[in-house]
């Protein structure tokens, strides 16, 4: 929905928001896909799940754009903050523990580099 909200007022989705969605979702998607394959799911099933998620994400962006067109700036700020909190929760609950289990000492450095990349995109 945040992507749709970014289009309100004739604007475009900002590069930092798009990058944040991409950067946070690609590793999570790869991890989930690998887990589904290890559980014996077929490639067709894995691709079907991710295609469904992509379609639902597009619909959510459309709903955000259409339904929130007249929302006050405070509501938009709350929605954006909740979305940011959801990304942070996903990172803390899933990605950091999994990364630590796999890379141990590199987890902190990789996390710091991720934040540095996000900051560089924001200020560019």
Image (spheres, helix red, strand yellow):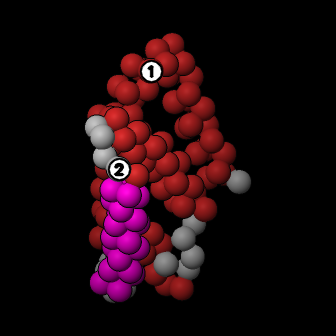
- Image quadrant where residue 90 sits: top left
- Image quadrant where residue 58 sits: bottom left
In the rendered image, residue 118, in percent from the top left (x then y), is placed at 58, 45
Q: Which mark is residue 77?
A: none
Asked whether residue 55 is drawn in magenta, I would say yes
Looking at the image, can residue 44 be seen? yes
Q: Calculate the distance from the C-alpha at mark 2 to the C-alpha at mark 1.
A: 24 Å
Q: Nearer the viewer, mark 2 or mark 1?
A: 2
Asked whether residue 50 is drawn in magenta, I would say yes
Q: What residue is disc 1 on?
A: 102
Q: Secondary structure at mark 2?
A: loop
Q: Residue at x 46, y 15 (%)?
A: 104
Secondary structure predominantly adopted by residues drawn in magenta? helix
Q: From this view, report whether residue 111 is shown above or below residue 85.
A: above
Looking at the rendered image, the quarter that the N terminus falls into is bottom left
Crowd around label 1: few <14 · some 14–19 · many ≥20 (10 Å): few
In the rendered image, residue 107, in percent from the top left (x then y), is placed at 49, 22
Crowd around label 2: few <14 · some 14–19 · many ≥20 (10 Å): few
Q: What residue is disc 2 on?
A: 42
In the rendered image, residue 74, in percent from the top left (x then y), is placed at 32, 69
Q: Which residues are magenta?
A: 44-67
């Amino acid at each position: 929905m945040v992507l749709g909200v970014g289009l309100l007022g004739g604007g475009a989705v900002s590069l930092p928001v798009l990058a944040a969605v991409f950067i946070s979702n690609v590793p999570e998607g790869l991890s989930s896909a690998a887990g589904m394959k290890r559980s014996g799911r077929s490639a067709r099933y894995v691709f079907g799940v991710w295609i469904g998620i992509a379609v639902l994400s597009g619909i959510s962006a459309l709903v955000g754009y259409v339904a929130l067109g007249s929302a006050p700036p405070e509501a938009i700020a709350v929605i954006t903050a909740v979305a940011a909190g959801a990304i942070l929760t996903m990172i803390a609950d899933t990605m950091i523990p999994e990364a630590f289990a796999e890379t141990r000492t590199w987890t902190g450095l990789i996390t710091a580099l991720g934040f540095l990349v996000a900051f560089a995109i924001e200020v560019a």
